[in-house]
Image (tube, helix red, strand yellow):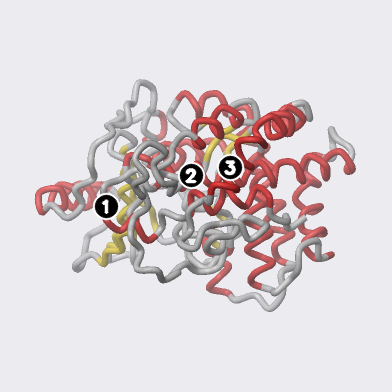
Amino acid sequence: MAGAGVGGWPTLRDVTIVSVAPGWADPQWRATALDWVTGQLDRHGRRVTGPVEARQRPWSLVWQVPTDAGPYWFKANNPGTAYEAVLLAELPRHAPGRVLDPVAVDPARGWSLLPHGGPSLRDLAEPDPTRWADVLAAYADLQRTVAPRADALVALGVPDQRPAALPALLADLLDDRAALLLASEHDGTDTRPATGGTDTRPAPGDDGDGDTRPAAGVDGDGAGSDDGGLDAATYERLRAYLPRFADDCGRLADTGIPASVQHDDLHDGNVFAADGYRFFDWGDASVAHPFGTLLVTLRSVAHTYSLPEGDPVLLRLRDAYLEAWTDRHDRAALREAAGLAVRVTTVSRALSWRRALATTDPGRAEYADAVPGWLGELFAPMPV
């Protein structure tokens, strides 16, 4: 584990995130993790008062830990999302008040321990979406504040999905036939996991733990396969689109808007709404063009409030978010950049799902079609 730095924060230089199987069901692993949690709480004068309540997904294990001062939250990420612990340590230093201050993090193991954050926006069940204007302004402030740390975050293991990197990442993903649920081109075998033929996925924004997936088999033109994989026509269309995608990424890079941390799953379940707005659940995040945030956020708002693409409410929320950059860029240019960023970020979503599902957990089969599903969304209508 990293050593203690100034003010008790861990120093993250020379931290290596180990890529090992989580083994979350192993009694020895659980005992080790519980000892760590108990010890960290004890250092802060807190005492565990009962058994933990666990929730496991292929990408993380979360424990609600009861204490004499209310619940605390332990999270263990799988190797594909272990860098979240790095962000949980770094972001409070540079954007205090916009994220929770962790009790402890262990970046090498992908472990974190957080206090209770209070109600989320989803818990409050706001009757209209206008509050999102303030939420997005606060989030934009976080991104602008963190932008000078972009290179440092990449060096610490946060995925680099800046516009210059995305074309090669898309080309690599298109070569990953298993992740795209494509039949093998050599032996005709089907690489897709069995899912029982039932679409159990919530609509975008319905899950508070990173589970925002496109509708089953959707690629914007109805060209997905019946069980969520890419069909041959969509795959070839994506291949042919690579030069255009590279051009779009180049235009986005040329806007001069600095890259920053990009949450990539910012919906009402991932925003604490007590004492200002604080953002959590960073397991999908990357260093990327900041405006990509609007893809999931505006789709989630549209779903929650039954708004069509391009609704004036969504346009006002986009503009409220972009306002933070109007000191250096004109609004028309910012809106154009937002349109480009939202579209190319469909690839970022596919990449984040591939990382999250880089596990042998059999539960991954339920979510595997999120990777090709988000790629197909590259050709779908965008929220703005």
Rendering quarter of residue 84: top left
Q: Which residue does the image show at 70% across and 74% down from the upper left?
A: 306
Disc 2 residue type (three-letter) = Ser
User: On the image, numbered disc 2 is attached to which residue?
Assistant: 352
Disc 1 residue type (three-letter) = Asp
- How would you rate the neighbour count of disc 3 (Cα within 10 Å): few for under 14, some for 14-19, many for 20 or more? many
Q: Which residue does the image show at 61% across and 47% down from the upper left?
A: 346
Label annotation for residue 256: none
- How would you rate the neighbour count of disc 2 (Cα within 10 Å): few for under 14, some for 14-19, many for 20 or more? many
Q: Is residue 238 above or below residue 314?
A: above
Q: Judging from the image, what secondary structure is the residue with disc 3 in?
A: helix
CA gap, disc 1 and disc 2: 17 Å
Label annotation for residue 361: 1
Q: Judging from the image, what secondary structure is the residue with disc 1 in?
A: loop
Q: Position of residue 46 (x, y in %)?
A: 27, 57
Which of discs 3 and 2 lies nearer the camera? The answer is: 3
Q: Position of residue 309 (x, y in %)?
A: 76, 63
Q: Is residue 247 above or below residue 64?
A: above
Q: Quadrant of the C terminus?
A: bottom right
Q: Which residue does the image show at 50% across and 29% down from the upper left?
A: 153
Disc 3 residue type (three-letter) = Val
CA gap, disc 3 and disc 1: 24 Å
Q: Return the residue found at the far front.
A: 187
Q: Quadrant of the N terminus?
A: top left
User: On the image, numbered disc 3 is attached to which residue?
Assistant: 347
